[in-house]
Image (cartoon, rainbow, N blue to C red):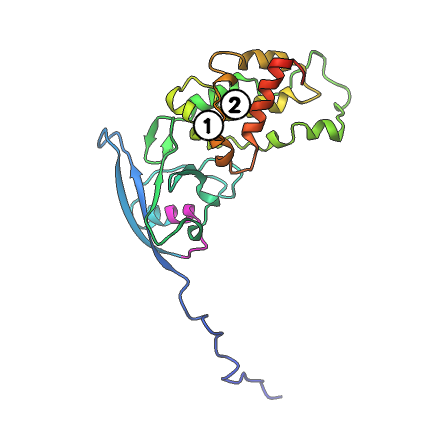
Amino acid sequence: MATPTLDKADSKPEAGFADSPYITVTLRIRRFNPEISAEAAWEDFQLEIDPKERVLDALHKIKWDQDGSLTFRRSCAHGICGSDAMRINGKNRLACKTLIKDINPEKPITVEAIKGLTVLKDLVVDMEPFFQAYRDVMPFLITKDTNEPTRERLQSAEDRERFDDTTKCILCAACTSSCPVFWNDGQYFGPAAIVNAHRFIFDSRDEAGEQRLEILNDKDGVWRCRTTFNCTDACPRGIEVTKAIQEVKRALITRRF
């Protein structure tokens, strides 16, 4: 039996298929290494990359192929862990969710550490103050029953929906480090801590709402918010952060939640 052969005309690539998808981009990264200098400085890197790839991919290419000393955090690379939050072209974003083609690759793409937290090296900041504020609002279910429950704590779909939005926080700090109040006063709890307090204040199964409200009633608490909406714009999960903060303020005034 004869082996079938492809007609040469049929084997031609589709129009445009042979064209390279790669473009040349420049990443302008704000570098800082305390072992070398007390001052940060911008450094440009050029690379070939598919515009459909992400800024995180570009950072990997630079670290692996050009400068192994480049330092940044990343883990899941799928917008879940929140560890690669950074300022890209002046806005807080997750590097793993930001496509090259969406941030005007014809001009240098600026990448720097998020603001309001001490930079340790390059794009890595000290997250401890951020996580301390998170711990201070007691982000866990609290009930008065000291005995282990014998059945699950039931909740209606309506009650669950009440705090559904604020369960989506991934603690990336994009909202908190976009807040002008936090930039100027590191004592402010910040949007992320308030969002995580909201998640339990409005949980019908929780019994420590009053206690959390008193924590946020502090001079560095919820009243420091100036409603600039920076936090809402910065959230990579689409949480209505400013709305949540306003609901906590209202609960403090009315004591209804």
Q: What is the span of residues highlighted in magenta in the rendered image?
A: 50-60
Q: Quadrant of residue 167?
A: top right
Q: Is residue 151 above or below residue 26?
A: above
Q: Residues within 10 Å of mark 2 (few under 14, many from 20)?
A: many
The reply to whether the magenta stretch includes residue 77 is: no
Q: Is residue 141 above or below residue 228?
A: above
Q: Residue furthest left?
A: 37
Q: Quadrant of residue 21?
A: bottom left
- Mark 2–mark 1 Cα distance, whole angstroms, equals 8 Å
Image coordinates of residue 31 in percent, x first then y, are 29, 37
Q: Residues within 10 Å of mark 1 (few under 14, many from 20)?
A: many
Image coordinates of residue 128 in percent, x first then y, are 43, 23
Image coordinates of residue 9 in percent, x first then y, are 50, 84
Q: Amino acid at mark 1?
A: Thr
Q: Could you say which disc has been placed on residue 191 in the image?
A: none
In this rendering, position of residue 99 left or right of residue 42:
right
* Residue nearest the viewer, comparing 234 with 86: 234
* Residue nearest the viewer, comparing 201 with 48: 201
Query: Badge 2 is on which residue?
Result: 193
Q: Amino acid at mark 2?
A: Ala
Question: Which residue sits at x=46%, y=44%?
Answer: 96
Label 2: state its secondary structure: helix
Query: Badge 1 is on which residue?
Result: 176
- Which sits earlier in the primary sequence, circle 2 or circle 1? 1
In this rendering, position of residue 243 left or right of residue 89:
right
Question: Which residue sits at x=56%, y=25%?
Answer: 195
Image coordinates of residue 100 in percent, x first then y, are 42, 51
Question: Which residue sits at x=47%, y=39%?
Answer: 75
In this rendering, position of residue 66 left or right of residue 253:
left
* Residue nearest the viewer, comparing 90 with 228: 228
The reply to whether the C-beta atoms of the residues labelled 2 and 1 are less than 8 Å apart is: yes
| Quarter of the rendering occupied by the N terminus | bottom right
